[in-house]
Amino acid sequence: MIAERTLRNWRKDALRDLSIKETKMPISPEQLNIDVLYRAEMNNRILRLTQALLDMHLMKGIKA
């Protein structure tokens, strides 16, 4: 099982918006839009999955 601290760190990282700051090369506006949408989708997935795992940690603590 993944540690609760790791899950919280992943959630914190997913909540940060780093998509534009990490861009180093000038790219087309279309590519920037694709990159931003991709990053947003991945962050949403990370948030949903980590929330489910944190809920499992909580339930495990209640049963014990």
Image: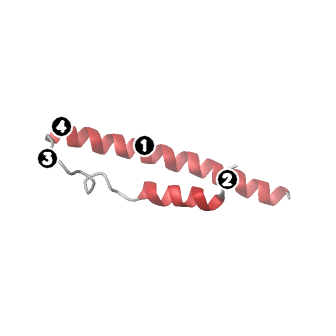
Label 3 sits on residue: 26
Q: Is residue 46 left or right of residue 24?
A: right
Question: Dot 4, crowdedness within 10 Å: few (<14), some or many (≥20)?
Answer: few
C-alpha distance separating marks 3 and 1: 23 Å
Label 1 sits on residue: 42
Earlier in the chain: of badge 1 and badge 2, it is 1
Earlier in the chain: of badge 4 and badge 1, it is 4
Q: Position of residue 57 (x, y in %)?
A: 71, 55
Q: Is residue 45 left or right of residue 59?
A: left
Q: Amino acid at mark 3?
A: Pro
Q: Amino acid at mark 1?
A: Met
- Residue nearer the viewer, 39 or 44: 39
Label 2 sits on residue: 55
Question: Dot 3, crowdedness within 10 Å: few (<14), some or many (≥20)?
Answer: few
C-alpha distance separating marks 2 and 4: 38 Å
Earlier in the chain: of badge 3 and badge 1, it is 3
Dividing the picture into quarters, in which one does residue 14 lie?
bottom left
Closer mark to the observer between disc 2 and disc 4:
4
C-alpha distance separating marks 3 and 4: 12 Å
Closer mark to the observer between disc 3 and disc 1:
3
